[in-house]
Amino acid sequence: LLEGLDLYSEKDRLKSFLNWHENALDKKALARSGFFYLGNRDRTQCFNCMGVLKNWRPGDDINTIHSESFPTCRYWTFDFDDYLTESDRNLFREMFPCIDPKRPSMKFYEDRISSFEGKWTHSGPPTISDIAKAGFFLFDVDASVRCWYCDVVVSDVSRQWSPWEEHAKQYPSCHFLLRNRGHNFVEAALSSVTDNEPEPALSYEYQDEKRCKVCLDRDAEMVFIPCGHLSTCLICTQSLRQCPVCRMKINRSYRTFPS
């Protein structure tokens, strides 16, 4: 039943539901949530974490059940590779929960991949997969690519470019970027801009963002949990109970260090 199927593809996962009971849970929703059908009863498996779920009931919230049953599944944690160490990945996952996206309909990799189908005319590099993993989807209106989380736009996509590095140069404070690459990667990408290369407009904004939001003098170096904002220096943090950016209660804080 699964032979010849590319289970990374939602369309191919949907094909595995050939003998699925039509009066059961929506097979399209299951495939979209990363599941394929194992062929017996209602046992389904996630292509990413390989977690198996069964005993589905009509009305089940598939996405919630998936994320709560397998909280480290990369389909849900947006972790697409092993660039970060496991300890850093766990830390950044907590620091940057990605809870306030600008384009929530493009939250999932599959949806971003689908946005390119039949419309993308560039052969790369980068590949469509590279672009989608870095958070970008194809914006139909002007054929640019945009990040699902921060909505930053990359217009010149006809050249060879590195999606993660471009993301860092254009919008270095994006939580999705920081979650997958960390502060050191962002700092390195910004420092790689040469004198002959125009400085991205938003990098100046980044310099302002690096200042403490309380004293407006020292660099911000403390990241707050759970909101993930990097907004204050160590000294000012000591008197805070709420994040000065979003007013969310601070449960914990971590000190960051420049590369």
Image (cartoon, grey):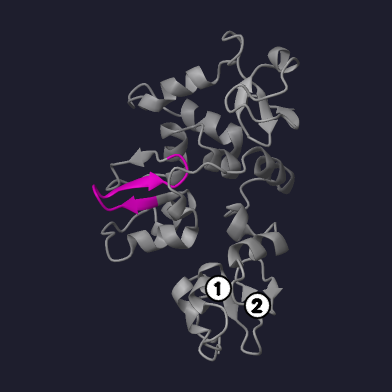
Q: Is residue 140 magenta?
A: yes
In this figure, which residue is indicated by the disc labeled 2? 56
Q: At 68% across and 30% down in the image, what residue appears?
A: 224
Query: Which quadrant would the N terminus be assigned to in this image?
Result: bottom right
Say few, some or many: other residues with alpha carbon within 10 Å of mark 2 (under 14 / 14 to 19 / 20 or more): some
In this figure, which residue is indicated by the disc labeled 1? 30
Q: Helix, strand or loop at disc 2?
A: loop
Q: At 44% across and 47% down in the image, what residue appears?
A: 148
Q: At 60% across and 77% down in the image, what residue appears?
A: 58
Judged left or right of residue 213, residue 224 is right
* Range drawn in magenta: 137-150
Q: At 43% across and 32% down in the image, what residue appears?
A: 169
Residue 30: percent from left, percent from top: 55, 73
User: Which amino acid is tagged 1?
Assistant: Leu
Q: Are marks 2 and 1 in contact (CB under 8 Å)?
A: yes
Residue 3: percent from left, percent from top: 54, 87
**Comes first in the chain, label 2 or label 1:** 1
Say few, some or many: other residues with alpha carbon within 10 Å of mark 1 (under 14 / 14 to 19 / 20 or more): many
Residue 77: percent from left, percent from top: 62, 53
